[in-house]
Amino acid sequence: VIETWEAVKKEEKGRKNILEGIPPTLPVVARAQKILQKLRRVKSDLAPTVGAKVSEDEVGKRLWELIAEAEASGVDAESALRRFSGEVEARYKKNTGD
C-alpha cells in the first residue's frame, strides 16, 4: 500500500523520486527526519536499523553530547548533518536511477 501511495504521489506531483518533495529550507534535523521517514517507507537500506526505543530525554542527551564532541573537534554539527543527508539523498538517487 505504501509503495503504491508513493508511486501515485510521485506521478501526481511529477517527482523523480520520493525524496524530491522535501523542502531544502527545513531545519537540518527536521529534514534528516523526513529523509529517514521516506527511506523507511520504501524499505531502503540507506535508512539505518535501530535497536531499542529510547526516551526523549535520552535522545536529547545523546544529541547534546554529540554536538559537544563535534564542537570540541572543530566540526559544525549542523553543516555535517546537512552534508551527510545530501550524500544519502545522492546515493538514493543513484541507486534508484533517478
Image (spheres, rainbow, N blue to C red):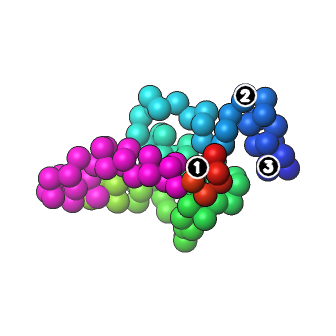
Indicate the secondary structure of the residue bearing disc 1.
helix
> Which label sits in the foreground, 2 or 1?
1
> Which label sits in the foreground, 1 or 3?
1
Assess whether mark 2 and mark 3 are in contact (beta carbons under 8 angstroms): no
| Image location (x, y in percent) of residue 69 | 21, 59
Q: Nearer the viewer, residue 28 or 24?
A: 24
| Residue 93: assigned label | 1
Q: Examine the rendered structure and indicate whether residue 30 appears above or below residue 96.
A: above
| Residue 66: assigned label | none
| Residue 2: assigned label | 3
Indicate the secondary structure of the residue bearing disc 2.
helix
**From where the camera sits, is residue 40 visible?**
no
| Image location (x, y in percent) of residue 28 | 41, 40
Distance between the alpha carbons at the discs numbered 2 and 1? 17 Å
**Label 2: few (<14), some or many (≥20) within 10 Å?**
few
Which span of residues is magenta-colored? 66-91
Residue identified by numbered label 2: 13
**Label 1: few (<14), some or many (≥20) within 10 Å?**
some
